Image (cartoon, rainbow, N blue to C red):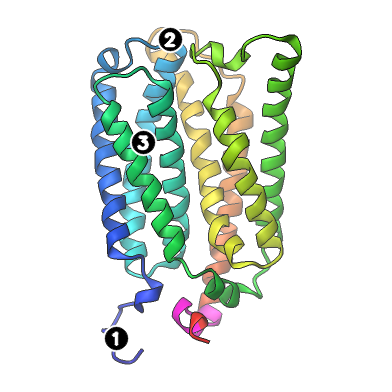
Amino acid sequence: MGELKAGMAPARDRLPTRVLWLVVSAALLGAVGSAVGLLTPRRVYGQETPALLEAAIAQDLVNLFLVVPLLLVLAPAAARGRLRCWLCLIGALAFTAYNYAIYAFSVHFGPLFLVWVAVLGLSFYSLAGCWAALDKQALQERFHTLRCGLAAWFLIAAAVLFGFLWLREVAADLIEGRPSTSAQSWNVPTNPVHVLDLAVFLPAVAAGGVALLRGRGAGYGSAPGFLLFLVLTTLPPLVIPFVTGARGGVALWSAALPLAVVALLAAGVLWRLLFLMRQDADRHPERSLAAAGGR
């Protein structure tokens, strides 16, 4: 430890350089794709329904002006040993992979198809690298005294709530023997949000909440990212009414209030969890990941 340069974190405390460059590549390529989509929406999204076109424009705005800068800030900070940035980076990458899966599978084949596939692959492997490099056992030893009940129960409640909402809609369509109601506005066979949420994201959020309640390293490692994901995932739907209005349509604001409430609650819980982690680090500086993992 004493041989390290001043201000430099131990190697096991830092995001690996190879993962850093994967993140930067995903962010820059995503910025190019979003910029092209915003500058030439008819060329890129001309075959889509108005609802999907507006959703894609809203997503491009959030990607370009929030998610890309967030990735470019969090990744270098994680590579310098900022643990909380590393944990939040996991959520930003999960959000990126999630949304580019929707681009790649739901938007018609066109000029940005290979860009979307590339960002999907880069963000997925960046996410896998971030998670694999994180020492979950060291996290468990470092934060075992942290009280994270609020964050844990919030994640479990969010997973149950959204799972119930999606299943209620899916069940109603199945019982009536009709196509997916929510998929019709995008003219796609199934709602990709339902597929990704029910198959992957919501079970992972619930499992992360349970792991956090039990004081597991996987819970400490995933909870900040899941909370950030929940914040980010509310933003494109909140932007859509503004896009609709700018295009001369009738903006629908019925979902804005509940989404804003979810965003604010998730942001508040995330801030509190990161604050508790910072307090713990200040009180127990000896509990670095390297020190904990080396016991």
Up the image or down, 82 lies above or below 32; here it is below
Mark 3 or mark 1, earlier in chain: 1
Judged from the image, the secondary structure of the residue bearing numbered disc 3 is: helix
Residue 172 in the image: above or below residue 128 = above
Residue drawn at point x = 30 percent, y = 78 percent: 8
Q: Position of residue 280 (x, y in %)?
A: 56, 75
Instruction: Read off the residue under disc 2.
Output: 49
Neighbour class for label 2 at 10 Å: few (<14), some, many (≥20)? some
Quick check: 252 left or right of 81?
Answer: right
Membership of 214 in magenta stretch: no
Between the residue at mark 3 and the residue at mark 2, the CA separation in whole angstroms equals: 21 Å
- The residue that appears at 73% across and 32% down in the rendered structure is 164
Residue denoted by label 3: 63
**Magenta part of the chain:** 282-291
**In this picture, residue 172 sits left or right of residue 110:** right
Depth check: give the residue in front, 187 or 34.
Answer: 187
Residue at the extreme bottom: 2
Percent position (x, y) of residue 153? 72, 52
Look at the image and say whether residue 284 sits in the magenta stretch. yes
State the image coordinates of residue 246 (x, y, percent, origin top left).
38, 14
Which class describes the residues within 10 Å of circle 1: few (<14), some (14-19), or many (20+)?
few
Q: Are marks 3 and 2 in contact (CB under 8 Å)?
A: no
The answer for how far apart the CA atoms under marks 3 and 1 are is 37 Å
Q: Residue at x 37, y 23 (%)?
A: 57
